[in-house]
Image (cartoon, grey):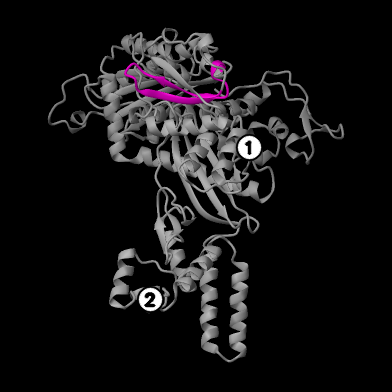
């Protein structure tokens, strides 16, 4: 790693004007491109104490070996230059667009003598009207197929068109009425262009007047007894309405807007865009972004706008986003320059546009979840991830079984731990286990990790010893030869399978505690590592420097999924345990009394007060309660001080029977006996 102070520019050498800067590594490759309203304070912020920088920023400045900048006149020029450099150099620490594909659009080539309707991708061409983009090309073809009945515009290629003119016969579409056949002179060039312009007007949202005109013509034809013409116009109207139904009306007529929403986590972000033209959703697109730089939601919005409109996408009158870039005015000016008129860039606050933005947001969340699911379930990807982990940790073989441990508590109370298992890169939830920390009181993650690892592998050694795995297996003993991983009834043992890789959530201290626990038990055939969340570094026992996997590594992604799943499982158990402790009642700590029989007792007697006053014989009348259990319950309830009566805080009335109280705010008087905690 490079020391940023070795290439830090002199403070007076950095200008204060707007500009764009590039960080290069030791090989001269551009690794990051950024822009600034004032270069001096922005660049100076990168050369402060590394402890004060964001982890991703610290990694970037220690990877870089030099920095250079270019001064521009305005912030808008800086925005344009930044985008062009990101496209040119593809820096590794800038936001990457993993799904940066071109989307199909419906295009009408008005720059030709005989305009053509077709599906086009890529940069926009001058003189061509575009509609969309659409998620799939077949969606465009379905819409065009319906509209060609009413607007029989040419859809054939130039080669087919020239061939038809030479032979004097139209193509099949000309015979079935879905092309006006200008190739053979059925309509003139001006008449065909008028059809194309009507097609464009309809696609642009100006549908009401055209439909009303067709309906008037249909009524006139019917009045003049021209029923065939009226039937044809009726079918044309039906085709247009079906085409309109494919793009539901969501906003007021003549509303042209693009709505952009984000769903993000610490590592990735999904971008979704709805294109609304004429009040209808005409297209949708999206991509997934790696958050390889320190960027917030506003920064992601700015990058998404650059990606969307920098490649030639038409800019509508309104662009609605979840957060405004900082500063927003240069972005507005840049978009206005691309459009040729003012663009309203804002966050919707109320009404239909805010509701539609919520829909776009849900689509973004679903896209991110689907991306993670596909990435995790792909066999080739999982195999590559396991191999990358084995190579990075120098393992003899790929870790087919990975166990991960995490500690969770709330200010030192209800300390618990989780164990999650991944086999072949997929979660094996039936193998998950959870632990309560019993060896000490208070908050100490290192001691907790040592206790959990010790308990888990002590159980593993005990089960190996019980199944005779210490001895050489006999060939005629199928249970021993199979590994002894099942009990006498054939069920798999809980801790019989050792992992090939043990992962702990934490850095060097947690890894050292886990290594110490394994050494104390004499286990030396289980690989161990820790994943520190701050910098996503992989720590190995006894090593002073971590193993840093590339941000795009599938191996790192798998380790993060394992760590996050362990964290989720531990948090859910800790919250459940804390909730039970806070709501524990007098019957919860009675030994031998489970949830079903507690409910049966309360249902039979109606309240805890009546239950406390019941005799042993009366307790035995409850289904499922034997004499021994009844005696235990009676002794437990008689040995405790009864709770103070509940008080209705609205009326001040003392309620003698808390279980039979009516609606109303109720408070209990302080108890003299300490509350009981579920063991």
Can residue 487 be seen in this snapshot? no
Does residue 391 appear left or right of residue 505 in this picture? left
Write the start and end of the magenta stretch as one range. Answer: 18-41
Q: Residues within 10 Å of mark 2 (few under 14, many from 20)?
A: some
Can residue 350 be seen in this snapshot? yes
Is 662 in the magenta? no
In the rendered image, which residue does mark 2 sit on? 174
Nearer-the-camera pick, 355 or 293: 293
The relative height of residue 216 versus residue 43 in the rendered view (above or below) is below
Does residue 333 appear left or right of residue 466 in this picture? right
Q: Quadrant of residue 1?
A: top left
Is 33 in the magenta? yes
| Quadrant of image for the C terminus | top right
At 54% from the left and 31% from the top, the residue drawn is: 299
The percent position of residue 357, horizontal first and vertical second, equals: 60, 46
Count the numbered circles shown.
2
- Farthest residue to the left: give it: 475
In the rendered image, which residue does mark 1 sit on? 601
The alpha-carbon separation of the residues under discs 1 and 2 comes to 84 Å
First of labels 1, 2 by sequence position: 2
Nearer-the-camera pick, 255 or 244: 255
**Res 585 label:** none
The relative height of residue 54 versus residue 345 in the rendered view (above or below) is above
Q: Residues within 10 Å of mark 1 (few under 14, many from 20)?
A: many
The percent position of residue 521, horizontal first and vertical second, equals: 32, 12
Nearer-the-camera pick, 358 or 518: 358
SS at circle 1: helix
At 60% from the left and 43% from the top, the residue drawn is: 320
SS at circle 2: helix
């Amino acid at each position: 790693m490079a020391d940023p102070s070795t290439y830090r520019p002199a403070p007076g050498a950095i200008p204060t004007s707007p500009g764009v800067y590039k960080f290069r590594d030791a090989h001269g490759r551009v690794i990051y491109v950024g822009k600034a309203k004032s270069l001096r304070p922005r660049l100076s912020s990168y050369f402060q104490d590394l402890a004060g920088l964001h982890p991703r920023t610290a990694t970037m400045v220690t990877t870089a070996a030099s920095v250079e900048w270019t001064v521009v006149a305005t912030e808008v020029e800086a925005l344009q230059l930044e985008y062009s450099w990101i496209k040119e150099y593809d820096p590794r620490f800038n936001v990457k667009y993993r799904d940066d594909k071109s989307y199909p659009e419906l295009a009408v080539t008005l720059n030709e003598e005989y305009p053509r309707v077709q599906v086009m991708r890529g940069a926009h061409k001058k003189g061509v009207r575009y509609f969309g983009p659409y998620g799939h090309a077949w969606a465009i073809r379905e819409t065009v197929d319906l509209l060609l009945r009413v607007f029989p515009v040419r859809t054939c290629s130039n080669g087919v068109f020239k061939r038809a003119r030479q032979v004097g016969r139209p193509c099949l579409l000309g015979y079935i009425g879905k092309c006006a056949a200008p190739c053979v002179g059925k309509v003139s060039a001006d008449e065909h262009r008028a059809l194309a312009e009507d097609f464009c007007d309809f696609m642009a949202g100006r549908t009401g007047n055209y439909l009303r005109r067709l309906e008037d013509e249909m009524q006139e034809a019917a009045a003049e007894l021209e029923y065939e013409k009226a039937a044809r116009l009726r079918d044309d109207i039906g085709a247009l309405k079906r085409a309109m139904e494919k793009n539901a009306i969501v906003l007021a007529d003549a509303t042209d807007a693009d709505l952009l929403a984000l769903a993000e986590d610490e590592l990735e972000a999904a971008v979704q865009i709805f294109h609304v033209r004429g009040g209808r959703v005409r297209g949708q697109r999206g991509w997934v972004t790696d958050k390889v730089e320190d960027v917030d939601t506003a920064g992601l919005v700015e990058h998404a706008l650059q990606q969307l409109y920098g490649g030639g996408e038409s800019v509508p009158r309104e662009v609605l986003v979840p957060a405004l870039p900082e500063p927003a005015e240069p972005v507005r000016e840049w978009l206005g320059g691309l459009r040729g008129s003012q663009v309203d860039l804002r966050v919707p606050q109320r009404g239909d546009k805010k509701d539609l933005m919520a829909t776009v947001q849900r689509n973004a969340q679903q896209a991110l979840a689907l991306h993670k699911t596909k990435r995790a379930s792909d066999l080739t990807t999982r195999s590559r991830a396991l191999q990358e982990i084995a190579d990075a940790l120098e393992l003899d073989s790929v870790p087919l079984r990975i166990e991960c441990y995490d500690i969770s508590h709330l200010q030192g109370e209800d300390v618990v731990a989780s164990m999650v298992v991944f086999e072949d890169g997929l979660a094996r939830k039936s193998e998950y286990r959870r632990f309560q920390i019993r060896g000490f009181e208070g908050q100490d993650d290192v001691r907790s990790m040592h206790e959990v690892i010790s308990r888990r592998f002590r159980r593993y050694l005990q089960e190996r010893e019980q199944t005779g795995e210490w001895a050489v297996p006999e060939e005629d003993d199928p249970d021993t030869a199979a590994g002894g991983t099942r009990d006498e009834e054939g069920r798999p043992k809980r801790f019989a399978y050792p992992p090939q890789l043990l992962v702990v959530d934490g850095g060097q201290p947690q890894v050292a505690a886990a290594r110490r626990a394994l050494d104390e038990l004499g286990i030396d055939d289980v690989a161990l590592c820790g994943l520190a969340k701050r910098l996503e570094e992989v720590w190995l026992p006894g090593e002073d420097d971590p193993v840093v996997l590339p941000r795009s590594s599938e191996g790192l992604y798998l380790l993060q999924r394992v760590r996050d799943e362990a964290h989720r499982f531990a948090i859910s158990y800790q919250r459940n345990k804390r909730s039970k402790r806070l709501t524990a009642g007098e019957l919860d700590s009675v030994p031998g009394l489970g949830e079903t029989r507690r409910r049966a007792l309360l249902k039979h007697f109606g309240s805890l007060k009546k239950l406390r006053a019941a005799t042993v014989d009366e307790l035995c009348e409850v289904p499922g309660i034997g004499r021994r259990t009844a005696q235990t319950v009676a002794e437990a309830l008689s040995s405790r001080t009864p709770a103070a009566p509940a008080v209705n805080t609205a009326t001040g009335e003392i309620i003698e029977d808390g279980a039979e109280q009516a609606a109303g705010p109720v408070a209990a008087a302080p108890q003299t006996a300490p509350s009981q905690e579920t063991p």
